[in-house]
Image (tube, rainbow, N blue to C red):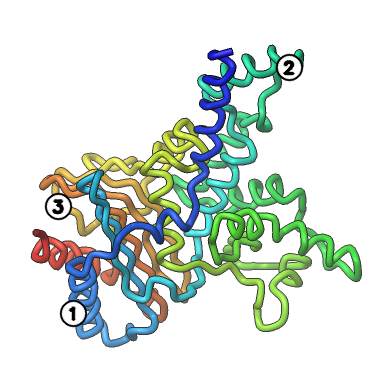
């Protein structure tokens, strides 16, 4: 009987690993970090006059002291088109949908099923080699084809010619699956649309709706919260969180030969000896980066930078990174 209750405890622990946006909101706001973000923003707006205050958002979580995590933001709840940062949400949903259970979870389920006289089954669909390849390509080199493949699998949809009537309504409703999934966790985001290089076309264009009402949308705080899940090993499960963090890792000394998300992005601003886990997003309209970093001085930070209207300036994100790290350093206790 004790073993039975221990099994239930393990399964309950696994279930509560599904952290949500309320976990982020519960992190205390540190005025000193807020001052640093405002100082960095003011300096950057002067240095890059093309960038306006309403087109800049910052969110920072300081995890240096595990028992005293703090955060702050600058326009952190403002909605932005996330570009390829939406792939972070696709990644988390893919692990929720497809990831194999951890060894501890499988063992607990076997025990529980044996008490109930049931056949043991994996609680999730299989994470196949092809899905794993798509996840790697989507995160490590930001491949849009890989993202499209995963969106089709996650929502049971397929791109194609225009649809009419109920067929179009059903297509759009299926694509809302990720929105519903994250809304249940407190997130106000939209992750309905595939990232395109030159599209969308056909039914994917219809999906956007009047005035692009269904366009992908996220905030700096929502993305910071997602990274907080992963870094704290609360995203789906510790096992899944570790796998996601491995996908996000970006070696710096030396970088991978295929690396395309460090130079001209936030990672370029980091001092030697730093460690970086990140995902960028950029189009002709926006230029973003979302990262977890470990600095040589011991600081551990989640940093999200969203910008709009100055995407053609490749010096922008490294400059914001340098200014932000300098301000945060000056405002340390």
Residue drawn where x is 59% and y is 13% of the image: 1
Between the C-alphas of marks 2 and 3, the distance is: 56 Å
User: Which of label 2 and label 3 is nearer to you?
Assistant: 2
Residue drawn where x is 11% and y is 60% of the image: 332
The residue that disc 1 covers is 43
Residue 264 visible: no
The residue that disc 3 covers is 271
Residue 102 left/right relative to 110: left
User: Which of label 1 and label 2 is nearer to you?
Assistant: 2
Residue at the limit of the structure toward the front, as seen here:
1
Residue 58 left/right relative to 191: left
The residue that disc 2 covers is 116
Report helix, strand or loop for mark 1: helix
Image x and y of residue 209, in percent: 72, 76
Q: Earlier in the sequence, mark 1 or mark 2?
A: 1
Report helix, strand or loop for mark 3: loop
Q: Name the foreground residue: 64 vs 275.
A: 64
How dense is the environment of label 1, judged by Cα within 10 Å: few (below 14), some, or many (20 and up)?
A: some
How dense is the environment of label 3, judged by Cα within 10 Å: few (below 14), some, or many (20 and up)?
A: few
Image x and y of residue 33, in percent: 21, 66
User: Mark 1 and mark 3 in contact (Cβ < 8 Å)?
Assistant: no
Image x and y of residue 10, in percent: 52, 26
Between the C-alphas of marks 3 and 1, the distance is: 20 Å
Between the C-alphas of marks 1 and 2, the distance is: 63 Å
Residue drawn where x is 31% and y is 54% of the image: 302
Image x and y of residue 107, in percent: 57, 16
> With respect to residue 77, does 88 lie above or below?
above
Tell me which corner region of the image, top left, top right, bottom left or bottom right, holds residue 110.
Answer: top right
Residue 151 left/right relative to 173: left
């Amino acid at each position: 009987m004790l073993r039975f209750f221990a099994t239930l405890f393990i399964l309950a622990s696994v279930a509560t690993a599904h952290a949500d946006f309320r976990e982020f909101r519960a992190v205390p706001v540190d005025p000193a970090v807020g001052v640093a973000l405002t100082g960095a923003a003011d300096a950057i707006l002067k240095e890059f006059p093309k960038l306006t205050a309403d087109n800049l958002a910052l969110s920072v979580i300081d995890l240096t002291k595990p028992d005293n995590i703090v955060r702050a933001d600058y326009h952190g709840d403002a909605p932005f088109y996330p570009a390829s940062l939406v792939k972070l949400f696709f990644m988390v949903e893919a692990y929720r949908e497809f990831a194999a259970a951890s060894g501890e979870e499988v063992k607990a389920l076997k025990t529980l099923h044996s008490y109930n006289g049931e056949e043991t089954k994996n609680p999730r669909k299989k994470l196949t080699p092809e899905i794993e390849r798509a996840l790697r390509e989507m995160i490590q080199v930001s491949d849009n084809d890989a993202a499209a493949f995963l969106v089709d699998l996650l929502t049971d949809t397929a791109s194609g010619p225009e649809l009419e009537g109920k067929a179009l309504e059903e297509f759009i409703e299926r694509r809302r699956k990720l929105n519903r999934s994250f809304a249940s966790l407190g997130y106000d985001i939209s992750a309905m649309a595939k990232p395109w290089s030159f599209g969308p076309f056909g039914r994917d264009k219809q999906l956007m709706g009047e005035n692009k009402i269904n366009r992908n949308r996220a905030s700096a705080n929502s993305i910071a919260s997602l990274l907080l899940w992963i870094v704290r090993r609360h995203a789906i499960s510790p096992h899944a969180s570790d796998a996601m963090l491995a996908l996000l890792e970006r070696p710096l000394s030396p970088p991978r030969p295929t690396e395309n998300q460090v130079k001209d992005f936030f990672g370029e601003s980091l001092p030697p000896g730093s460690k970086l886990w990140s995902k960028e997003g950029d189009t002709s309209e926006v230029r973003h980066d979302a990262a977890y970093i470990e600095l040589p001085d011991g600081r551990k930070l989640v940093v999200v930078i969203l910008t709009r209207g100055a995407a053609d300036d490749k010096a922008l994100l490294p400059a914001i990174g340098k200014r932000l790290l300098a301000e945060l350093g000056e405002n340390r206790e």
